[in-house]
């Protein structure tokens, strides 16, 4: 069986026997490249893994294909069910490095990245990675999101189905397709501010008092939730004066 990191060329990138999406991006993204990406998700750990290449690019236009990701970002950290820009299943060492990663990712986005999202959910399903390195275009399209699992960087990567586009005509046509979506204000909107607001919450320096009360909340969260349910049940109980 061929390992995921094999150098054998494949037209398909499945994050398994036929190579990883991350390897394709590392090989094709060079200094001053201009990138166009369509993905439902974005995580800071996927950025971190490719930061050596991404930090040197000229620009990136990132289009979220799933607006529920943006709508569910929770800058105030009040909704425990909100989507996050952190990957799941991370080790403690990675968690401890998260603040620095988020800070560097935010600085990169602020200086080099434009971010938009489609307005309607379940409208855009395709994933695209288009690279213009100043000399030629490269493109890959298929199913991989911009996450560790989607790029094949986790211990248990997703089984993806992506095709490397080796036709100049098709690469140009894909970029035209992307540009048509990117500039269609009826379909997409700018969401860079929301993303930066969320990232700021990942690296903000909280006061000791905030950390103390936040810790207490998480220790007693299940107990407090039970108390709230009981209070709501009592409030909804009607007491009638029958037989009086």
Image (cartoon, rainbow, N blue to C red):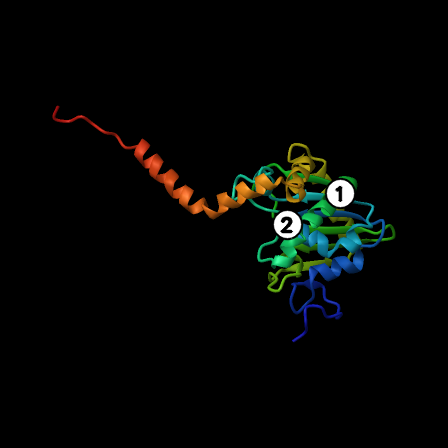
Whether residue 144 appears in this view of the structure is: no
Residue found farthest to the left: 243
Viewer-nearest residue: 239 or 223:
223
Quadrant in which the N terminus appears: bottom right
Q: Work out whether 98 lies above or below 17.
A: above
Q: Which label number is shown at residue 180?
A: none
Work out whether residue 138 or residue 54 is closer to the camera in this orientation and state it. Answer: 54
Inter-mark Cα distance, 1 to 2: 28 Å
Look at 76% across and 45% down and name the residue there. 108
Per the image, the residue denoted by label 2 is 126
Q: Label 2 near label 1: C-beta < 8 Å?
A: no
Front residue of 180/193: it is 193
- Residue at the spot of label 1: 107
The answer to whether residue 87 is left or right of residue 58 is left
Q: Position of residue 95 (x, y in %)?
A: 63, 54
Q: Residue furthest right?
A: 135
């Amino acid at each position: 069986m061929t390992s995921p990191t094999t150098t054998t060329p494949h037209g398909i990138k499945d994050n398994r026997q036929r190579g990883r999406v991350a390897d394709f991006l590392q090989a094709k993204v060079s200094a001053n490249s201009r990138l166009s990406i369509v993905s439902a998700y974005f995580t800071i750990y996927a950025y971190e893994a490719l930061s050596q290449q991404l930090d040197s690019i000229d620009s990136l236009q990132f289009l979220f294909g799933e607006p529920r990701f943006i709508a569910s970002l929770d800058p105030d950290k009040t909704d425990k069910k909100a989507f996050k820009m952190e990957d799941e299943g991370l080790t403690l060492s990675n968690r401890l490095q998260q603040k620095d990663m988020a800070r560097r990712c935010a600085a990169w986005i602020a200086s080099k990245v434009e971010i938009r999202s489609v307005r309607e959910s379940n409208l855009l399903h395709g994933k695209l990675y288009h690279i213009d390195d100043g000399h030629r275009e490269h493109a890959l399209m298929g199913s991989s999101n911009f996450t560790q699992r989607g790029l094949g960087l986790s211990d248990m990567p997703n089984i993806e189905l992506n095709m490397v586009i080796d036709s100049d005509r098709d690469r140009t046509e894909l970029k035209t397709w992307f540009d048509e979506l990117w500039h269609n204000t009826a379909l997409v909107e700018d969401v860079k501010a929301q993303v930066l607001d969320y990232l700021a919450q990942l690296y903000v320096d909280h006061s000791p008092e905030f950390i103390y009360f936040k810790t207490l909340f998480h220790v007693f969260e299940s107990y407090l939730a039970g108390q709230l349910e009981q209070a709501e049940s009592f409030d909804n109980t009607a007491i009638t004066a029958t037989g009086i």
